[in-house]
Image (cartoon, grey):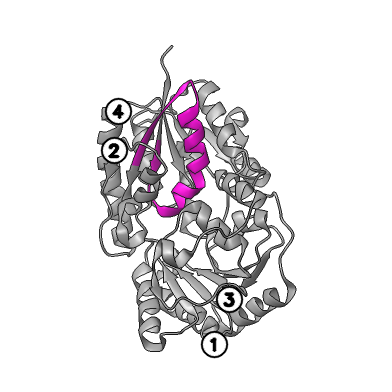
Amino acid sequence: MSKRKICVVITARPSYSRVKTALQAIKEHPQLELQLVVAASALLDRYGSAVNFIEKDGFEITAKVFNVLEGENLTAAAKTTGIGILELSTVFDNIKPDIIVTIADRFETMATAISAAFMNIPLAHIQGGEVTGNIDEKVRHSITKLADYHFVASESAKERVIRLGEDPEFVINTGCPSIDMAAAVAKDPSLNFDPYKKYGGVGTNPDLSNGYIIVMQHPVTTEYADSRKHIDETLYAVKDMDIPVLWFWPNVDAGADGTSAGIRSFREKYRSNHMHFFKNMEGEDFLRLLANSKCLIGNSSVGIRECAFLGVPVVNVGSRQNKRDRGNNIKDVNYNRDEITKAIQYWLDNGKASPSNVYGGGDAGQQIATQLATMPLRFHKTISY
């Protein structure tokens, strides 16, 4: 009996960490063959070269798709998606997968979904059904309607996908694969590496032994024109804090040029001795760093997902994660330096939050691989012209 060919498309730095345990489970499953396609910003050094970590972890890459158009604005995002459709369609035609897997809600994932749908290849979507109130929500729900299998991360997401009209038989709450890694770290959360030696980065190397905070803030696509102003508020909120700050670079969304320019300008102007800037980090190392931190500041979904499971306090800035299911580890604030500073101080005074299993208990990867091996192959709905 031939193995079922499962093509997983990784398009960005966070997508890999969210699906790594599922990739491993697919690779090890006796009835499955993993076809791994790496595309878009996951291939680019300026966004952390996720491809290097993928290869280091021992995954064989079937194809690489270079499709990111420079500009970091709405037009570039639309054109990047268009190029992705062209290039991914060729890849899919060459490797002929039985099922294609796409992750979450970044704009690049739309290219994967459209190509699969128009080529009549069954599509599995991980992390559908969630709501945020920004452009990601439109992408996420659109992919849901193009997909055949839905591996959602929470019960409310499952209910929402079913309400969108999808067949309940093919909507499964597996939890989020990124929680699998967090569960492994939770068993032994020791900080067993030196982040400065292992990952370099820019800035001084403040002593982390008495605690530190982490910042990861991305531009918001629907507010991209204000990205410079938004990042300035966070930068000035932590400027004079008496605690080390480890800052991670933003993703490729529209407005990233404003966010990046704000960070560079601030860094050159102040050269703060308590701040260090990183591009990227292996998923497990980043989770260890988080688990030992005092809190996370910014608007990354890692604060909503993995930090909830680990009980890491989060100061969630702005609108990017609006409406998402939450644990009790979140304090929401506006783009306001005083609000951000007060919220950080609250967590510094009150310590860890209690852990939450709202996004699963740590076995999502295995569940997804099992479902991909046993679910009946489905063709997409007929498209009428």
If you read the primary sequence from the N terminus, does the residue marked by circle 1 or circle 2 appear first?
Answer: 2
Indicate the amino acid at tag 3. Asn
Indicate the amino acid at tag 2. Ala
3 and 2 marks in contact (CB < 8 Å): no
Q: Residue at x 42, y 73 (%)?
A: 227
Q: What is the quadrant of residue 270 in the picture?
A: bottom left
Which residue bears the numbered disc 3?
334
Q: Is residue 71 above or below residue 40?
A: below
Left or right? Give the position of 83 relative to 240. Answer: left
State the SS at label 3.
Answer: loop
- Gap between marks 3 and 1 measured at Cα: 19 Å
- Gap between marks 3 and 4 measured at Cα: 47 Å
Indicate the amino acid at tag 4. Ile
Q: Tag 2: Cα neighbours inside 10 Å, few (<14), some, or many (≥20)?
A: some
If you read the primary sequence from the N terminus, does the residue marked by circle 4 or circle 2 appear first?
Answer: 2
4 and 2 marks in contact (CB < 8 Å): yes
If you read the primary sequence from the N terminus, does the residue marked by circle 1 or circle 4 appear first?
Answer: 4
The span shown in magenta is 8-37
Q: Magenta stretch: residue 9 in it?
A: yes
Residue 73 placed where, x, y %? 32, 65
Location of the N terminus by quadrant is top left
Closer to viewer: mark 3 or mark 1: 1
Closer to viewer: mark 1 or mark 2: 1
Residue 2 placed where, x, y %? 41, 15
Closer to viewer: mark 4 or mark 2: 2
Which residue bears the numbered disc 2?
63
Q: Tag 4: Cα neighbours inside 10 Å, few (<14), some, or many (≥20)?
A: few
If you read the primary sequence from the N terminus, does the residue marked by circle 3 or circle 4 appear first?
Answer: 4
Which residue bears the numbered disc 1?
240
Q: Tag 1: Cα neighbours inside 10 Å, few (<14), some, or many (≥20)?
A: few
